[in-house]
Image (tube, rainbow, N blue to C red):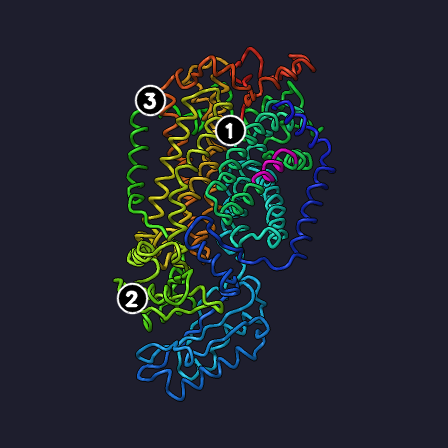
Amino acid sequence: MATFLYRLGRGAFRRRRLVALVWVALLFVAGFGAATASAPTSGSFSIPGTEAQRAFDLLDKRFPGMAADGATARVVVKAPAGAKVTDPGPKSEVEKMISGLKDGPGAAQIVSVDDPYATQAVSQDGSTAYISVKYDVSGMELKDATREALTGTGKAAQDQGLTVEIGGDALMAAPETGSGEIIGIMVAAIVLVITFGSLIAAGLPLLTALIGVGIGISSITALANVLDLGSTTSTLAMMIGLAVGIDYALFIVSRYRAELAEGRERDEAAGRAAGTAGSAVVFAGLTVVIALVGLAVVNIPMLTKMGFAAAGTVVLAVLVALTLVPAMLGFAGKKVLPAGTKSKLFGKGGKGGKGSKGSENSKSGKSGKGEQQEGGAEKPNAGTRWARFVLRRPVTVLLAGVIGLGAIAIPASQLEMGLPDDGAQPVSTTQRKAYDLLSEGFGPGFNGPLMVVVDGGKEIADGTADRIKGLEGVVAVTPPHLNEAGDAAVISVIPKDRPSSTQTEDLVHQIRAGSGDDVLVTGATAMNIDFSQKMNDALLPYLALVVGLAFLLLMLVFRSVLVPLKAALGFLLSVVAALGAVVAVFQWGWLASLFGVEQTGPIMSMMPIFMVGVVFGLAMDYEVFLVTRMREAYVHGERPGQAVVTGFQYSARVVVAAAVIMIAVFAGFIGASDQMVKMIGFGLAVAVFFDAFVVRMAIVPAVLALLGHKAWWLPRWLDRLLPNVDVEGESLRKHLAATAGTADTAGPTDSPEDPDKGRKLVNA
């Protein structure tokens, strides 16, 4: 594979205009498709195999239109202190609002507007009432005029002293890129400038990553309605695609600069960068894709689509790194190096040459600092010093890392899961205010009514309603509503407690336990309960599948049993610690104000399984990039301890930069107003921090130091069975030696005066 990637990278470098044109054309086509596509919907939500889903399916058959996916809104009105909404003045204002909705600009998309005085939607104390509005399309498909008419409904009533707030999914809008994401990109740019010491080299990974993400997001937008993709699908794809896109390009550019410092010709350096670092990029990307595509085993269509869409952006990031990045390096010329090394490396002619004096001098210049040393003339870089420190105290470092992450993971034992509703919105939003007004006027359970669907006639329905009335935790039960055929009924149950409470969950289980197959419980609250249970049931099978496949993949890469095992165990430690941090902030409220968390509550149900998938893929990125260099050094004759030092000497700086970039990108989403996006951004940012800086930078070298030669042990029979993927590039070196001669391909770094420099810099 290394030989193929070498040819691909060198070919892209030489035909850079054609390659760049193809990628720009793809961006244009995808952008055109996104611009001409209809507005994306919120995506249908279903949970196959659950009682709540069976109830919705029954509703579709027996009550056509009742289970439609159209948006809904509740316009909540509260009278001033001492007054009631039934008083003539407030009542007149409410009736004006109803007329305005029915006859206003958005009337064409409205299915019904319920009069609160006719539907008994008035609180017992008369202080609060609500107008129910149902639309014929989802919130994402509402026209701007319709949404503006809804938000402007209560302006006149507010002027008369009434409080008017609006809840429901009708106010849902497409997610927009906020300042947080932009700050994340800016931080990534600063890190790249510091790492490379060149604006061109720093800007190149950003540019190529944005092109890849642009194609991915535009394609998702163009296909959103065709594939029924949810509104959060593009957000996840952007989050993952941008992070890995920058990282993969970073590794290719860094390796290219290292090859130039070795005196390679520019096209040869591009080819070798693609053949060596590119091999690691392919396998790192493959682990991320496995983790994301593996979300399909959960059997929830929305999650499956999110995983496949994000996996598509990762594939694009890999392809961009292997083709567009070498092409852009061709355009960049000598500007990819810091100013102090350009003249030394290229000379007046602008090209490097093997054995040239300039290339030798460049080794001690800025471009080599932190990646390569001049035979003791320069003090060891930070990666080398840190690796030697860990080798001297492996047990201390190992215990500190494990105990520290274990302590942070403790809150994960108190994890409570649910799905966010308007009660999880920031307290400053009208949705949250409407939620609170309904809770005050009608009780906490009013925001999450249970829908009981009876597959039977009036007698069965009446008996079911009477039984539910006698259950603890029930505030009200509506009379059964029969369909036209009289063979099915719907009963609305108002719980005593808020939708996300354990008491409401217990009530759902009580209703189900005392009913037969002809009585089904559904509604948003029941769907949330079933969704959480399905997530719990799927976690272990999913974990086994993803970790198992990745374990086999890493055995191919590292030719070892213990190294992949160590990688998997380290990942589990970092992801549980990250879940502990999420629980502490979003459920317990620790440092909540620092991260803009205005409302604590249960953790999003998909968070654990989602973090397992995404973080595992990203964690394996660092494992591959860091340990591959150690593997190469060990194969070429270095002692296990020295191989660890060599890996850190050449890879630590770039791995740290990649981790900081990824953390910055994910942390940028913490500023999002959407609670789900905020939680995902925080969880992924802390998970990458724990995995990169504690597990990969501390625990991994400590474990390898303690294992010694055993770390690279592989049974002979298994060694014969496993194909050789040659991430170290050994076949590439043999190929180049056979085609151009050993002397020509070796370069000045293979000179006997300094044999250490002759070893290739994998993933530098």
Is 318 contained in the magenta span? Answer: yes
565, 686: nearer the viewer: 565
The N terminus appears in which quarter of the rendering?
A: top right
| Image x and y of residue 748, in percent | 60, 17
- Does any portion of residue 107 appear in the rendered image? yes
First to last magenta residue range: 314-323
Residue 65 coordinates in the image, percent (x, y):
52, 65
Mark toward the viewer: 2 or 1 = 2
Q: Is residue 127 left or right of residue 764?
A: left
Q: In this view, does 187 lie above or below 362?
A: below
Distance between the Cα atoms at labels 3 and 2?
70 Å
Q: Neighbour class for label 1 at 10 Å: few (<14), some, many (≥20)?
A: many
Amino acid, disc 2:
Lys
Q: Is residue 555 above or below residue 676?
A: above
Q: Disc 1 marks which residue?
A: 369
- Nearer the observer: mark 1 or 3; the answer is 3
Image mark for residue 392: 3
Quadrant location of residue 728? top right
Query: Mark 3 near mark 2, Cβ–Cβ under 8 Å?
Result: no
Q: Mark 2 points at which residue?
A: 469
Is residue 292 found inside the magenta-colored segment of the image?
Answer: no
Q: Residue at x 61, y 25 (%)?
A: 275
Amino acid at the residue labelled 3: Arg
Say whether disc 3 or disc 2 marks the residue closer to the N-terminus.
3
User: Disc 1 versus disc 3: distance between alpha carbons?
Assistant: 24 Å
Classify 10 Å Cα crowding around label 2: few (below 14), some (14-19), many (20 and above). Answer: some
Q: Which residue lies furthest to the bottom in this view?
A: 88
SS state under label 1 = loop
Position of 723 with respect to 683 (left or right) is: right
The chief SS type of the magenta part is helix
